Image (spheres, rainbow, N blue to C red):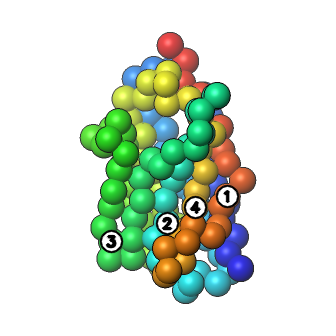
Amino acid sequence: QVQLVESGGGLVQAGGSLRLSCAASGSVSSINVMGWYRQCPGKQREMVATISRIPTTSYAGSMEGRFTISRDMGNHTIHLQMNDLLPEDTAVYYCAASLWNGEWRYWGQGTQVTVSS
């Protein structure tokens, strides 16, 4: 089992920045890729960014250039630096971890990000 604990959400004005962190514990050797997903009000959950062990990164189109995902292998933590935030970035952000077979097995409890206009 893997436990994921997010931190760093909050309220920020449009144009501001926030940094989310997610610490993994437990059977961390079973994790290949970690990432951030979000669920905006009234919408389905969507991928924000992912990072592998290599590390290689991927971003959803609307976030690329504003968001940066990074990974600290030593303490099994990932971060999401979010700049130039927009009101439409308001969402619950979830940390997730996938196994070596690609299954997104583990999810954090979510952290609220609210961007005011």
Tell me, yes or no, whether the two marked residues, 2 and 4, touch with CB atoms within 8 Å.
Answer: yes
Q: Residues within 10 Å of mark 4 (few under 14, many from 20)?
A: many
Q: Position of residue 41 (x, y in %)?
A: 63, 28
- Identified by mark 1, the residue type is Gly
Q: Circle 1 sits in a helix, a strand or a loop, which is it?
A: loop
Q: Which mark is residue 96?
A: 4
Give the image location of residue 55, x and y in percent.
33, 71
Q: CA distance from mark 2 to mark 3?
A: 10 Å
Name the residue furthest top.
Answer: 117
Does the rendering let one see residue 12? no
N-terminal label among 2 and 4: 2
Q: Secondary structure at mark 4?
A: strand
| Residue marked by disc 1 | 108
Instruction: Inspect the image, locate mark 3, and give the three-letter code of the amino acid beneath it.
Output: Pro
* Vertical position of residue 50 compared to residue 1: above or below: above
Q: CA distance from mark 2 to mark 4?
A: 6 Å
Label 2, on which residue? 34
> CA–CA distance between discs 4 and 3?
16 Å
Name the residue rendered at 50%, 13% in the picture: 117
Three-letter residue code for mark 4: Ala
Which residue in the protein does label 3 denote? Answer: 55
Q: Gap between marks 1 and 3, in whole Å?
A: 21 Å
* Residue count near mark 1 (Cα–Cα under 10 Å), binned few <14, some 14–19, many ≥20: some
